[in-house]
Image: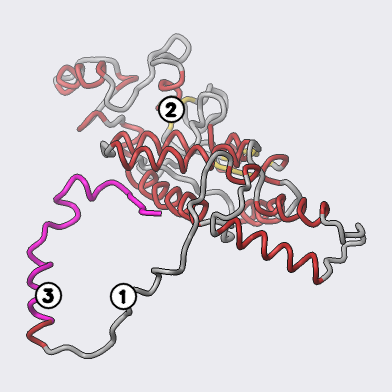
Amino acid sequence: MEIQLTDFENAAFTTFITLLTRVILTFDLNLYIPLSRVDANMQRAHGRNAVVKGKFFFRRHMAPLEKGDDGFGETYSSMFSTSVNGGKKGDSKMTTLYSESNLAGMDSRRNGSGDSDSEMFEEGVSEKRRVAPNASGGAEENSYEEMTMAEIMTGKGDYFPGLIPLVYAYLDHIQCDSLTMERMTSYLDFIEKRATGQLITPATWIRNFIRDHEDYKFDSVVSDSIAYDLMVACKEIGEGKRACPEVLGNVEIKPISAGDAYVKKLDSKRVNNGYISSLLERYSARKTFGATQADEAVEYQI
């Protein structure tokens, strides 16, 4: 990922990627596509305004199928379909993770009764998901399709929920505290606006800056004066001295001051073994990250 103009943007994308890895592991998702399609996506991403106008290959069968084999000859549906359609898919009631009907009917199914189409096992996990935790999705030709960046991020149809809603679902799953949730919401809203074209990318902003510069002759030559003014503008945006709503929206970057940046110098002098042992004993007595609920939430102080 390219570095952005501000710390807020960098924190937003870094946090999103970190949370997405947790989503994949927790929800047993599979985002594999053929490597040739990955190469094609990279080539398409280099196009002008590709984030809005381009289409990219992305996996449509992220979750195990709840009905059907490989999507051919029978309507594809997954546990995401029931979330979009309020628990219904056509005339058949599809299996949903942790739904009331599934949990209430677990005892009857253990005793040999119940609907075989919605057969559940331990902890309300469907058979398809239990036997295929990596979401094979059937035939590879039918497991991916072309999507816009807005569809990848916000969802498409009733079979692909979108990455941002999945991240929200994960934050709800871990019971994220309100303070962290507020920050995560600002990050995710920003990413969604970038994906839908409501906010332009830094590449588009740089292109517009050069084209609007008084010294640009529309001959593809970036003179020294244009390059200098561009660097000054980037620096001012990053430091919060220059507003850039077309890139950041209503996000306000607080001015950065270097006055107190080096109040405490990093010391590299050697210390004795006894002092090191006392420091280690102090921190080894603290609870582990997994033992505290607060530490489960992803929090950045940017």
Q: Where residue 177 appears, x then y in whole percent?
A: 27, 38
Three-letter residue code for mark 3: Leu
1 and 3 marks in contact (CB < 8 Å): no
**Secondary-structure class at tag 3:** helix
1 and 2 marks in contact (CB < 8 Å): no
Report if residue 294 lies within the magenta region: yes
- Magenta-drawn segment: 276-302
The disc label shown at residue 279, or none: 3
Query: Is residue 153 or residue 161 the one in the foreground?
Result: 153
Q: Where residue 226 appears, x then y in whole percent?
A: 79, 64
Query: Is residue 302 or residue 185 the one in the foreground?
Result: 302
The span from disc 3 to disc 2 (Cα, nearest Å) is 49 Å
Q: Decide: is 3 above or below 112.
A: below
**Callout 1 environment at 10 Å: few (<14), some (14 to 19), or many (20+)?**
few
Of badges 3 and 2, the one in the foreground is 3
Q: Decide: is 203 above or below 67.
A: below
**Secondary-structure class at tag 2:** helix
Q: Decide: is 101 above or below 70.
A: above
Disc with the residue nearer the chain's start (3 vs 2): 2
Three-letter residue code for mark 2: Phe
**Callout 2 environment at 10 Å: few (<14), some (14 to 19), or many (20+)?**
many
Q: Which residue is mark 2?
A: 80
Quadrant occupied by the C terminus:
bottom left
**Callout 3 environment at 10 Å: few (<14), some (14 to 19), or many (20+)?**
few
Three-letter residue code for mark 1: Lys
Report if residue 278 lies within the magenta region: yes
Disc with the residue nearer the chain's start (1 vs 2): 2
Q: Where residue 7 appears, x then y in whole percent?
A: 49, 57
* Residue found 33% across the figure and 79% down from its top: 265
Q: Which residue is mark 1?
A: 264
3 and 2 marks in contact (CB < 8 Å): no
